[in-house]
Amino acid sequence: MGRFSDFFIRELGRRQVWCFFLLATLVYALPLILADFPYIDDNWRSLSAGMAWAEQGRLFAQLFFNVLTFTDAAPNIFPLPLLIATLAMASALTSLTFHCFRQPTIACCLVLLPLWYNPFFLQNLSYQYDGAPMALSVVAVMYAITFRHPRRSVQWLVPSFLIALALGLYQVSLNVFLGLCCLEVLRAAHDKTAWSQWPGLIGWKFAQVLLGWLIYCVSAYPFMGSSRTLLLNWAASPWLQIHINIARVLEKVVLLFHGGLVWVFAGLLLCAVAGAIRLGLMVVQREDSRAKKFLIGLLCLLTVPVVVLLVSGVALFFRDFNEGARTLMGFAVLLVLLFYLSYLALASVHERLPLLLVVPLLAMLSLSFAYGRVLTVQKTFATSALFNLERDIASRPLLRDAKRIYLSVSYSDHWLAGAAGSFKQMPVLHYLLNIDFYMLAENLPKVGITNVVAEKDRRNATRVGYQGYPALVESQYYRIFLIGDYGFIVMKEPAPIKSLRW
């Protein structure tokens, strides 16, 4: 028994740390693999083996699938890309652990695990195509932090190329790199790094980001479409726009803190505050002048608001602001910051206390499995909806032979009645799922229906323009009208989900 308990506090070797991270990352991704649900964009990509990443400034995501599939397109090979990304993440977490801790233990591994156990990252991993490139972009910035080489030129260039690679896979990963730089500041304060090394520590990171951005600008950026590069209109109250964007992000993040998770994160926050106080006392005790200690303390203090802003980060400044969970990659670094400060506080009391960090990680793992079940329910509902629509169209020659059938764009929070209980107990699940439509037109070719297209220029025409005509099909969820050679599928507003009691 003693040997078993000692395992949790003794120093681990690199192989043991890698095995721990491999198991932990695979368990977190397992519900998504088991669900095997094509998520939104996956439908049209798998239909045509399409890519279209280069025009989004993500050229390296496109090349990733070209290399992996040995084609010039992107046939669906899920879950192979996710498994590769999981292996890469385990290795990157191992490298980062030995970078941050001289004698890593299980508790040290727990500190960095939120880089993968980020609840909002579940939406990124939901994409059978985009999930792996997004994960690999985080891997790239992690290696940019940990890379060390005695030659100055190599130390300068390799991290910069890794940053450019990350940007070419998914630009939002820059938030993770900047957040990890903030963690480096806290580590330098804790390790009592000499004052003479601080300018180089900070300046070096800024130089790597700048060079990485320049490399990205001459490699992947030229392929990006103009609509993806528009920044906020600086002539129209830009700070108000940023404030509104931050409020929208905060509104979504708050969805995570519900039920028992409130108490879990409250405890984590209290421990982090205690760790911050302890770190502040260490800065005060440094053998430096008051001015130097003040500057170091100020830098450490500024890491908190900076990391909070980096939850959404660079996305806040774009005109086409996306508040989706997949853009909140910076939340992972905020969690790591809280875990690191909590580790400092708990380890100062007793060597076993940092193992309490497993509690919030188990809460996030539970959320992953709950989300996996919601994806399974959504898959069942989507399959049923697809076959019902296919039957109604294929069984009627007038619809089957119509030149075109327009599918109306209709959004609602009440489509997925089967997950109502989970949504009530864990509101963040609905935000992560982000599916508020009945059916995508891209799904119908899977069952041989090829004349259905999504309503675009005709938006809302099907909803209000044909209500006076008799419906050819009257279903629980939709009506189908036929006028001449054209059909129109009009969605019904689903009834609000009622709580069921036996």
Image (spheres, rainbow, N blue to C red):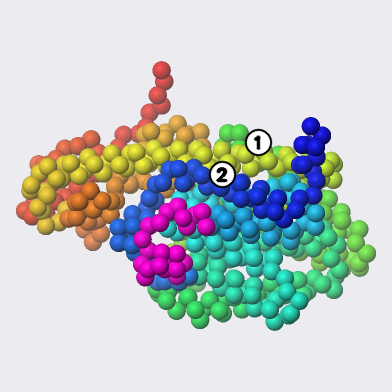
Q: Is residue 405 above or below residue 218?
A: above
Residue at 83% x, 50% y is: 278
Secondary structure of the residue carrying tag 2 is helix
Residue at 69% x, 65% y is: 146
Label 2: which residue?
Answer: 27
Q: Residue furthest right?
A: 287
Q: Is residue 452 left or right of residue 159?
A: left
Q: Is residue 70 magenta?
A: yes
Nearer-N-terminus badge (1/2): 2
Residue at 51% x, 33% y is: 425
Packing grade of label 2 (10 A; few <14, some 14-19, many >=20) is: some
Mark 1 or 2: in front is 2
Label of residue 80 in the image: none
Label 1: which residue?
Answer: 263
Q: Is residue 487 above or below residue 379?
A: below
**Residue segment shown in magenta:** 63-84
Q: Is residue 114 above or below residue 429?
A: below
Which x, y percent locates residue 382? 32, 42
Which x, y percent locates residue 478? 22, 41
Residue 221 or residue 245, whichever sits in front = 221
Kind of residue sitting beneath label 1: Trp
Which x, y percent locates residue 363? 60, 39
Packing grade of label 1 (10 A; few <14, some 14-19, many >=20) is: few
